[in-house]
Image (cartoon, rainbow, N blue to C red):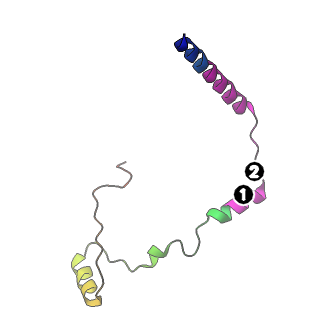
Amino acid sequence: MNAIKRIKRSLALVVGLMVGVQQTAAQPTKKPAADSLEKLQRLIAPGPDDSQWMQVPWMPSSNIYAARKKAAEEGKPLLLWYMAGEPLGTC
């Protein structure tokens, strides 16, 4: 008897969810106001400090020996980034 009650409750829940989804899908969507779009655009636009990695004087990967020599002369560490393939997969 408990199993039948659970099945009925589950079916009632599924039907209720389906009706709720249909009602929200039928409602017309509202367009955002122009000032809110501008505010959002200013919020997500990159700032002057967001691309500081571009200011690093990177050495070309084709001359690893020159980069090693320069790092040794300046007493700085050498970062070598190596990967095989594209980070998002091949096309």
**First in residue order: circle 2 vs circle 1:** 2
- Determine which residue is flagged by label 1: 37
Element under label 2? loop
Q: Residue furthest left?
A: 65
Say whether residue 54 is left or right of residue 72: right
Per the rendered image, the range of residues in magenta is 12-40
Which circle marks residue 32 in the picture? 2
Q: Residue furthest bottom?
A: 73
Q: State the separation of the CA atoms marked 2 and 1.
A: 7 Å
Q: Residue at x 27, y 80 (%)?
A: 67
Q: Residue furthest top?
A: 1
Q: Residue at x 74, y 40 (%)?
A: 29
**Above or below: residue 2 compared with residue 47:** above
Magenta span: predominant SS is helix
Between 83 and 13, the one lying in front of the other is 13
Residue 56 position within the rendered picture, expressed as x and y whole percent measured from the top left = 41, 79
Tag 2: Cα neighbours inside 10 Å, few (<14), some, or many (≥20)?
few
